[in-house]
Image (tube, rainbow, N blue to C red):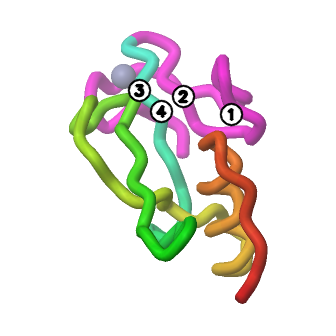
Amino acid sequence: MKYCSHCRALVSFIVPEGDNRQRYVCDECEFIFYENPRVIAGTIPVFEGQVLLCKRAIEPRLGYWTLPAGFMENGETTQQAALRAVSYTHLRAHET
Ligand SMILES: [Zn+2]
């Protein structure tokens, strides 16, 4: 990828602020081009017989209740992705 499909400026292959992987990022509009399989993995946390929900702290749908889940990254297994989603919460996960 060489140019931004939003504003046509050059893009750089860098680690965006707050991220830990290199992404193509527009030098002008700072749009981040995520390249991943677009597959979502998640968990259903159960505590004392009840399903726990998380309240979203980021957009989209800020403040909505949800299960811990997120887009998989390249090279991740579904289990790794699901555990990573849980790691963003205050929960601790184990396989059942
Ligand atoms: Zn751009």
**Alpha carbon distance from label 4 to label 3:** 4 Å
Mark 3 residue CB less than 8 A from any atom of ligand 1: yes
* Residue at x 47%, y 42% (from the top left corner): 33
- Front one among 22 and 85: 85
**Alpha carbon distance from label 3 to label 1:** 12 Å
Disc 4 vs disc 3: Cβ atoms closer than 8 Å? yes
- Front one among 40 and 89: 89
Whichever of callouts 3 and 1 sits on the residue coming sooner in the sequence is 1
* Disc 4 secondary structure class: strand
Kindly indicate the quadrant of the structure image that contains residue 59: top left
Q: Is residue 19 magenta?
A: yes
The residue carrying mark 3 is 31
Which mark, by number, is residue 32?
4
Q: As drawn, is 26 to the left or to the right of 59? A: right
Dot 4 amino acid type = Ile
* Residue at x 44%, y 59% (from the top left corner): 52
Q: Quadrant of the C terminus?
A: bottom right
* Residue at x 60%, y 55% (from the top left corner): 85
**Alpha carbon distance from label 4 to label 1:** 10 Å
The residue carrying mark 2 is 25
Residue 14 visible somewhere in the drawing: yes
Q: Which residues are magenta?
A: 1-28
Tell me which secondary structure the magenta stretch mostly adopts: loop
* Disc 1 secondary structure class: strand
Which mark, by number, is residue 13?
1
**Alpha carbon distance from label 2 to label 1:** 6 Å
In the image, is residue 1 above or below residue 92?
Answer: above
Outermost residue toward the bottom?
Answer: 96
Whichever of callouts 4 and 1 sits on the residue coming sooner in the sequence is 1
